[in-house]
Image: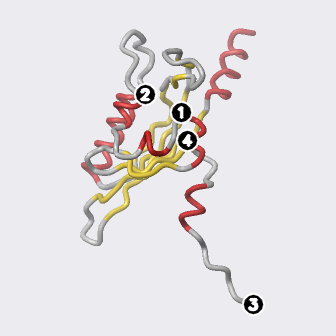
């Protein structure tokens, strides 16, 4: 029996978590379908842009720490060449159907470098898992006490 060849592009595309591939100059090189769904944007609107320009910090809400946490994670990966984990960060997301209206969201973020043969970071794979339902459940349990 012959083993099937793995189609890595298709595997990336259908991955279950919001995934972006970021260049060392912090521009988006590619995203998977889950990222498109979660962001409410089209691929062509994202590629070649900085995630910080597309998903800016909410300056009027200091609890929205996501942009700073993500930037620190990416910079840590670039400096060390090693994986960085942000276990919980708030990064609000604009409601695609209501421009200017943001929904409170919480994420676990893992930034993993893809290295050249010489150990230089050629790109960073950023996987974000929306943990907002878990945070909401914990809040509800706390409020019941």
Name the residue nearer the viewer: 23 or 91: 23
Circle 1 packing at 10 Å, graded few (<14), some (14-19), many (20+), is many
Visible residue check, residue 44 = yes
Disc assigned to residue 1: 3
CB-based contact (under 8 Å), mark 2 and mark 4: no
Q: Is residue 101 left or right of residue 121?
A: right
Query: Horizontal and vertical percent for residue 4?
Result: 67, 80
Instruction: Pick the quarter of the image with the N terminus.
Output: bottom right
Q: Who comes first in sequence, dot 4 or dot 1?
A: 4
Spatial CA distance of label 1 from label 3 is 42 Å
CB-based contact (under 8 Å), mark 2 and mark 1: yes
Mark 1 = which residue?
Answer: 107
Disc assigned to residue 115: none
Disc assigned to residue 36: 4
Mark 2 = which residue?
Answer: 66
Q: Secondary structure at mark 4?
A: helix
Residue closest to the far bottom: 1
Circle 3 packing at 10 Å, graded few (<14), some (14-19), many (20+), is few
Spatial CA distance of label 2 from label 3 is 48 Å
Spatial CA distance of label 3 from label 4 is 37 Å
Query: Horizontal and vertical percent for residue 89?
Result: 48, 28
């Amino acid at each position: 029996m012959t083993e099937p060849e793995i189609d890595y592009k298709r595997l990336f595309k259908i991955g279950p978590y919001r995934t972006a591939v970021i260049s060392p100059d912090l521009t988006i090189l590619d995203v998977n379908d889950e990222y498109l769904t979660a962001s409410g944007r089209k691929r062509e609107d994202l590629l070649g842009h900085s995630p910080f320009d597309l998903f800016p910090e909410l300056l009027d809400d200091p609890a929205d720490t996501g942009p700073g946490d993500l930037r620190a994670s990416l910079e840590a990966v670039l400096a060390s060449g090693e994986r960085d984990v942000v276990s919980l960060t708030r990064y609000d997301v604009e409601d695609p159907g209501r421009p200017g209206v943001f929904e409170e969201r919480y994420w676990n973020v893992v930034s993993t470098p893809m290295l050249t043969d010489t150990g230089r970071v050629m790109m960073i794979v950023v996987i974000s898992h929306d943990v907002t339902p878990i945070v909401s459940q914990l809040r509800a349990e706390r409020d019941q006490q």
